[in-house]
Image: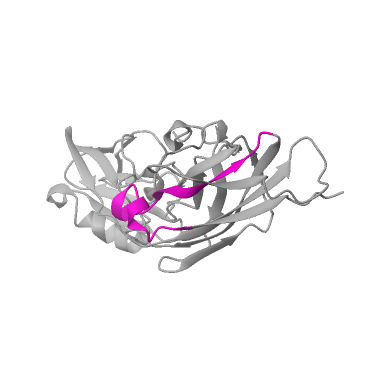
Amino acid sequence: MYQLPRSTRLIHIDSANDETVLNGTMKSDIRYYFKEAITVSSNYQIVVSPNEVQIPISFYQITAHNNTLNYTYDGEDFTLIISAGNYDAVTLQTYLINSFEDSVITVLFDVVNYKFIFTSTTGTFTMKSTSTCFTLLGFSNQDHNSALVSGVNTITSDQVCNMSGTRNIYVHSNLSVTSMDTRSSRFENILCKLPITCAPGQILFWSNFMLTRFPVNEIYIGMLEVQLRDDLGNLVDLNNCDWSMSIQIDIYPSDREVTQLDHSVLGLVPMKNNQNIISNQNINDVVP
């Protein structure tokens, strides 16, 4: 028989509260200290559910984490930095053409095979595996050396270029939820993964239709920290745009049947000096 929770609380999070944002205008690392802590007795279980999330797609496809192209030209090392922003293949092609040192390398885009072609008529060159933009350009993670094609030094990307940027947003918290993350091959404190299904400038709406719920170890919750991370585990830069979400806290008896409503199961304990009493666990202990 389905057991109803003894008590339920909703936590509504809004990044518009500037006092709680830990990473400035990025607005993807938020910490709240509750004036009244949620506490339960040891024979009850706290169960956490992410209810819904609204996030503006204000982050860029190219960021500081995927914007460098390291290359050598006639044995000399260079680094090309792609400015943060949203690009398609054509605008990225134009940017690269205008950015190579002394314009010694030109760039073509094969619209049929969706690959970039780099050429030079004056020297040999190598695209270095230390670059961070290889996925965008369609290069596998290795050095790529130019070769003569019809008398022109040429490198063609060996894979289809991927201009999608991050495909998901992962909502991390300092609560002891357990989600297996194959990126790190270990359990992480991830409340939910949000597939990005809308275009830049729109708002991503996500609801917990699967009714995912996590029993947690905490019996006191006095602080909550939530982070938004991309596919590579980096904090998302929302460019000073605000987002919000709701988290549901349900309380269940852990070792006895529910017989009557017990209002003492979940208490609200006043906090002193913004003290954190959530099992002394910081989100940085569980997020790499």
Q: Residue 110 magenta-drawn?
A: no
In-image side of 285 versus 66 (left or right): right
Residue shown at the point (47%, 60%) measured from the top left: 244
Q: Indicate the position of residue 252 as horizontal and vertical percent values.
A: 72, 44
Q: Point out the residue furthest to the left here.
A: 102
Closer-to-camera residue (157/129): 129
Residue shown at the point (81%, 46%) measured from the top left: 258
Q: Point out the residue furthest to the bottom here.
A: 202
Vertical placement of residue 270 versus 98, above or below: above
Rendered-image quadrant of the C terminus: top left
Give the quadrant of residue 274: top left
Q: Indicate the position of residue 91 as horizontal and vertical percent values.
A: 30, 63
Q: Indicate the position of residue 38 as horizontal and vertical percent values.
A: 56, 46
Q: Indicate the position of residue 138 as horizontal and vertical percent values.
A: 41, 47
Closer-to-camera residue (283/118): 283
In-image side of 285 versus 186 (left or right): left
Q: The magenta stretch spans which residues?
A: 13-42
In-image side of 245 versus 74 (left or right): right
Vertical placement of residue 155 versus 184, above or below: below
Closer-to-camera residue (73/4): 4
Q: Residue 36 magenta-drawn?
A: yes
Closer-to-camera residue (23/146): 23
